Amino acid sequence: MTGSDAAQPRDFDAIVIGGGAAGLMCALVAGQRGRRVLVIEHANRVGKKILMSGGGRCNFTNLGASPRNFLSANPHYCKSALARYAPADFVAMVERHRIAYHEKELGQLFCDESSKQIVRMLLDECAAGGVRIETSCSVTGVQRRDDGFRIATTSGEAVAPSLVVASGGLSIPSMGASGFGYELARQFGHRVLPTRAGLVPLTLSGRHLDAFDGLAGVALPVEARCNGTSFRNAMLITHRGVSGPAILQISSYWNPGDELRLDLLPDRDAFDWLQAQRAERPAAELRNVLADALPKRYAQRLCETAFASRPMRQYREAELRAIAAQLGDWPLIASGTEGYRTAEVTLGGVDTDELSSSTMQSRLVPGLYFIGEVVDVTGWLGGYNFQWAWASGQACGNAL
Ligand code: FDA
């Protein structure tokens, strides 16, 4: 081989930037359709977020996934891909690879053993499609020419008529997250909708944080409500504010300054219950009654800060009504979020108005595709985000 031959860019049918959930799915589908695919991953291994997901067991899909579980400026965009690649399709692949799994709750499917099995499965499927994967490889430039996209990387140049951007969102920078996909989108004239951390713990400050002093680690079921959406699940008090599934879910609907409310007794009619308690236990103090329905230390704190605790018989009906109303509509004054450092996802991203919902291809630049979290489609907590990564990856892989 002469020196000039060595400098020739390597030739592929498609180049995928990002070896995460969406990128690997897209690559394996295209590879198995006979396309020559290169995956470029700048981290030292692929699928790092898959590995850390679901507490190491990867909540790889949700049986109930439907478009209503996703946030996007265009809520219709995700419909086509989700309809063409259902949770059952991914489950079929998992079963083909003999990976044992179980349903935890609310349709969430997890590996019995390890998330590593999902990455192994995707890599085996990529290998079956002859996909070339380069890790620890950084993109230094992207140009569009007559012969397609010319990608300069730290491992040399590559060209392909199709370029797939699957570089994910901004959450957990220590795992390889970067703003690369948004920058590339802008480079090619795409609109990027403002990004913010989603599925993220909320922080409190001042007296609102002081009110939880000493309660870190206490968890209780709540219904969290914000901007017309509500989630019923556990809330966990942390040293900096609140977390737990109910809070992570509602955080995606919350913007600084928005009103957030909690039903602290979501499973009962608080007034009926308090009245019944007054009839059954007239000598019992309110704080002890509340401690039957709430964590004891939390009930105690409520009675120190919001309700003066007295024997139940001393409360008039109107007072019980007022207490019940407060318990059912408790204001949570959040000062912010923990940000991308701990967020599971990034809201916002490449505007779907300029993408095809059937192929994920740019409407502005033929041959350019965006899939997965870099796009303005964000799922709820519970396996929905991976389902979007698989579905958008599959739609794109079939179009290459
Ligand atoms: P993803 O982030 O998976 O992949 C993008 C890839 O691109 C990364 O490998 C990154 O290193 C690479 N990359 C970035 N910039 C690059 C560049 N310039 N050049 C080359 N490569 C580049 N979801 C769910 O459904 N169930 C769950 O259990 C969990 N659990 C979970 C836990 C934690 C801690 C987090 C942070 C997130 C989750 N999620 C989740 C969300 C889920 O991980 C996420 O939505 C998907 O991984 C998104 O898939 P993508 O392929 O789009 O991005």
Image (spheres, helix red, strand yellow):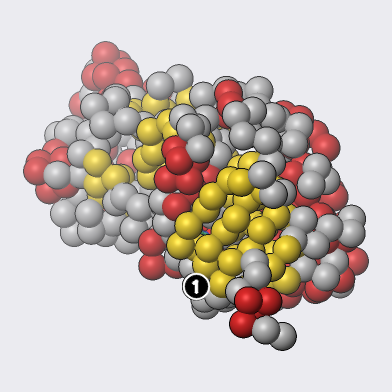
Q: Is residue 349 above or below residue 200?
A: above
* Residue sitting at the far left: 206
Q: Nearer the viewer, residue 112 or 159?
A: 159
Count residues near mark 1 (Cα–Cα under 10 Å), then give few for <14, some for 14-19, many for 20+: few
Disc 1 element:
loop
Residue occupying the point 83% across, 46% down: 398
Residue occupying the point 38% across, 67% down: 174
Amino acid type for the residue under numbered disc 1: Thr
The residue at which mark 1 appears reads as 154
Q: Is residue 216 left or right of residue 383?
A: left
- Which quadrant of the view contains residue 270? top left
Give residue 196's position: percent from left, percent from top: 37, 40
Q: Is residue 58 visible?
A: no
Q: Is residue 100 left or right of residue 247?
A: right
Give residue 324's position: percent from left, percent from top: 34, 24
Looking at the rendering, the quadrant in which ligand 1 lies is bottom right
Residue occupying the point 35% across, 52% down: 340
